[in-house]
Image (spheres, helix red, strand yellow):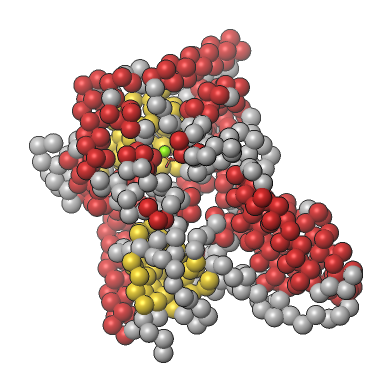
Amino acid sequence: MRPAVERRGRIAAPGIAAGPVVRLDRPEAGRRNPSGDPARERADLEAAIATAIEAIAGLAAGLEGDAADILDFQIAMLEDDSLSSGAFAAIASGGDAVTAWSDAIAVQIADYEATADEYFRARAADLADIRDRVLRALTQAGDDATPPGAVLAGEDVTPSRFLSVDWAAGGGLALFAGSPSSHVAMLARSRGVPMVVGIGTIAVGDGDVAIVDGETGRIILNPGEADWAAYETARKQAAARAAREESVLRLPAVTGDGVAIRMMINVAEPEELDALDPAICDGIGLVRTEFLFHRPAGLPDEETQLRAYARIVEWADGRPVVLRTLDAGGDKPVAGLTHDDESNPFLGTRGIRLSLVHPDVFMVQLRAMARAAALGDVKVMLPMVTVPAEIEAAAALLDQAVADLTSEGAACRRPALGIMVEVPAVAIEPALYARADFFSIGSNDLTQYVTASARDTAAVSALNDAGHPAVASLIRNVVEAGAELGRDVSLCGDMASDPAHIPALVAAGMRTLSVAPALVGRAKLAIAETVAGSS
Ligand code: PEP
Ligand code: MG
């Protein structure tokens, strides 16, 4: 029996799961004996590609936004002859299907990795996914070698790999590196998949079993008897807590001493809302509109954007909806728009900076938002504001959009225009930004800029701590300035989703929190256990 190994990491998504370990960095292909017959090799590869396309199309069905785009990209690549032609040529000259496919796609991956464009570099991981999917089909290892309830372990995981797993059967993620603020972490939280990151490299292999404890941030590899007993207890506690969360999910969020907290949700993809009851929240505190900008079809036009916003506004059913303008750049590149030659993208042309460099693109978004504002209680929020002039510039464009739409006879409304408080300059001197109609603290970026530790770098993840007193002090500063200026202040960073931070946020005077949909019940329970006192 293998000895138990325990590793501590950071919680990226809560919950507890146990299952067989599947390595993320191996194709998990089985073996295949070459037939020696080129026609047979070609037919087998064609069949494997078709199987892969079918499987991905099955996963993509019913999905929209980022998730669907990632899978659509994979299907488009598999259908593109230029990907497979190298493999078929190698087979024609006597190669076997497995080697021919692996070699041909390796060339493509190397090309993508070598490009200067960050978007295409990120797509290299998606190509590796489809390489492995075809290899699994080719070697009869099953289309998806991830058994139900498996624990995926490895350095990091791509969104496409995450989306390729059927998490309904349980399972979790144990990442050697990774970050709680990554895109996959957001997906894991919204789908309720336990995920622990930053556990450091561990040797895992076939036959290993692991417990992912997203409640305490631990991984236990090959648990012993006592570990299993503790797992059972923790699982029961997690199930009991989930039942308690469910019982408060539709109740108003109120502290133990009766202070009401407005509970909003963060939305990164509209389809997240499909399975959600609007009664669980007081509105949508943040719509990350980046999902619209990652489509292979290019930048979204006004109608496409309006459709997406209208769907969200309709779901909200009269509750407020805060649409954030595009926050591309940093860890969110958009092909053809973001500047990929910057040495430090997090300090570069991202958020409102980028939108103001591309007023044509920005205007399309502002027009769609002004039209959506005619449909419900829509507010518009600017990301990464650093100087008041950015609010002035955006307000002028928004006014122009409303004036143009009005003269065109289109239904529209001038929405309130607020800002994210995520650059320390704003958090230190919020009164300078009184031109904004409201403030929403982005604790993810505020923490990374205050602690000078990137939100997506595992090696500095312990420093990237929203609990740092300097972050708390800035939050208090913004709440006080908001009260003096008569501006609403909310917090929509992941800090609000972490029960450990809720007492400090309430003590700082924060009365509106916006959290990942899957964490609403948890946040409401934590609020109920918090005493606001005289704050
Ligand atoms: C934040 O920075 O806290 C935030 C909510 O925005 P994002 O995570 O999308 O950068
Ligand atoms: Mg941010």
Give residue 396's position: percent from left, percent from top. Answer: 48, 14
Residue furthest to the bottom in view is: 1
* Of the pair 273 and 55, the residue shown nearer to us: 55
Q: Quadrant of residue 232?
A: bottom left
Q: Is residue 7 shown above or below 447?
A: below
Residue at 41% across / 56% down in the picture?
Answer: 458
* Of the pair 208 and 188, the residue shown nearer to us: 208
Count of numbered marks = 0
Look at the image and tell me in which quarter the C terminus lies. top left
Image region (quadrant) for ligand 1: top left
Residue furthest to the front in view is: 343
Residue at 44% across / 78% down in the picture?
Answer: 209
Q: Is residue 253 left or right of residue 457?
A: left
Q: Quadrant of residue 161?
A: bottom right
Residue at 36% across / 21% down in the picture?
Answer: 436
- Residue 262 appears in the figure: no
Give residue 31's position: percent from left, percent from top. Answer: 70, 80
Give residue 26's position: percent from left, percent from top. Answer: 59, 70
Residue at 38% across / 19% down in the picture?
Answer: 388
Q: Quadrant of residue 367?
A: top right
Residue furthest to the left in view is: 534
- Residue 331 appears in the figure: yes
Look at the image and tell me in which quarter the N terminus lies. bottom left
Q: Is residue 200 left or right of residue 73?
A: left
Give residue 344's position: percent from left, percent from top. Answer: 49, 39
Q: Is residue 408 shown above or below 493?
A: above
